[in-house]
């Protein structure tokens, strides 16, 4: 009898341990800066670390007014190629390059009072760039939206209707020179560009994971912070002036 009881207790402990081990793991990366080479390095390294710790989801906590198109494109590519789902949480802004990065993610959640859109290409002075640049950005926004594929819906009559998970025309409208499109959270939900409205990260996680979950926060080392500082445009400009002066 004692052996049976011991076996049952051991089995219960093993099942409990397995349940804990099977909890969904979210790897959270906070991106609250201008989109530049430092931001690119932050996200790419965060995605690599998430893979190393075998996270089930990557949670990109986003608050940016945009930045360099080349850095945003590199981040977009890294997200699209990531093996595990990447979730964007717009907290509070995803403007310009931030909108492109958000659309690249598998799902988008937004905080009340946040916004997404306004991806027209401008120069450092805030002036709208020629249509050559706008055309490229519109195509990149469309292709990013198309990368998430189509959904199928069966009507009451039994007909199958296909529609884009994220309408490419909507993404393109965010780069329009005449009437630039931006969404509030409610508008984004209505147009298929937001899966839900959440007050914080925990609420986003609770919408996705059933049962237990764990959030791992990405932390930069001292070396990472030094490299980010050296990659900032202001420091690079200063170093270039010193080189020319030397």
Image (cartoon, rainbow, N blue to C red):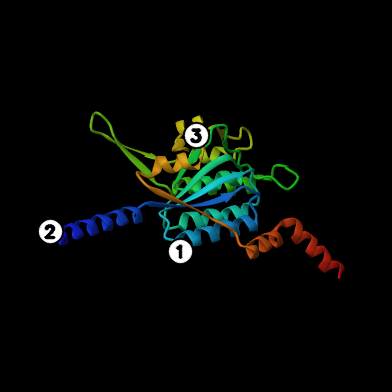
Q: Provide the residue designation for mark 2.
A: 1
Label 1: which residue? 52
Q: Is residue 178 above or below residue 107?
A: above
Q: CA distance from mark 3 to mark 1?
A: 33 Å
Q: Residue at x 47, y 45 (%)?
A: 145
Q: Quadrant of the C terminus?
A: bottom right
Q: Indicate which disc, 2 or 1, sits on the residue closer to the N terminus.
A: 2
Sequence-first disc among 2 and 3: 2
Is the residue under label 3 in contact with that under label 2 (CB below 8 Å)? no
- What element does badge 1 sit on? helix
Taking the spot 76% from the left edge, 59% from the top edge, the residue there is 235
Q: Which residue is mark 3?
A: 188
Seen in the picture, residue 15 relative to 107 is either above or below; the reply is: below
Q: Could you say which quadrant of the image residue 243 lies in?
A: bottom right
Identify the mark nearer the N-term, 3 or 1: 1
Residue 98 place in picture, x, y as percent: 58, 45
Residue at position x 23%, y 29% in the image:
157
């Amino acid at each position: 009898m004692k052996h049976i009881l011991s076996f049952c207790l051991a089995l219960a402990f093993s099942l409990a341990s397995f349940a804990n081990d099977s909890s969904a793991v979210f790897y959270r990366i906070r991106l609250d800066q201008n989109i530049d080479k430092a931001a690119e390095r932050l996200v790419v390294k965060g995605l690599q670390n998430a893979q190393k710790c075998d996270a089930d989801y990557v949670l990109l906590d986003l608050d940016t007014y945009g930045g360099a198109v080349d850095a945003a494109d590199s981040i977009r590519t890294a997200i699209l190629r990531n093996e595990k789902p990447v979730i964007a949480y717009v907290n509070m802004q995803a403007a310009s390059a931030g909108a492109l990065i958000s659309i690249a993610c598998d799902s988008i959640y937004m905080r009340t009072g946040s916004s997404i859109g306004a991806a027209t290409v401008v120069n450092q002075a805030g002036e709208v760039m020629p249509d050559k640049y706008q055309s490229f950005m519109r195509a990149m926004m469309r292709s990013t939206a198309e990368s998430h594929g189509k959904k199928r819906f069966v009507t009451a009559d039994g007909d199958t209707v296909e529609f884009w998970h994220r309408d490419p025309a909507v993404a393109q409208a965010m780069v329009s020179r005449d009437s630039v499109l931006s969404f509030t959270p409610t508008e984004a939900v209505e147009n298929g560009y937001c899966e839900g409205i959440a007050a914080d990260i925990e609420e986003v996680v609770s919408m996705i994971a059933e049962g237990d979950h764990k959030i791992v926060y990405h932390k930069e080392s001292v070396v990472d912070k030094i490299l980010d500082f050296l990659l900032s445009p202001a420091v690079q400009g200063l170093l270039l002036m010193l080189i020319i002066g030397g």
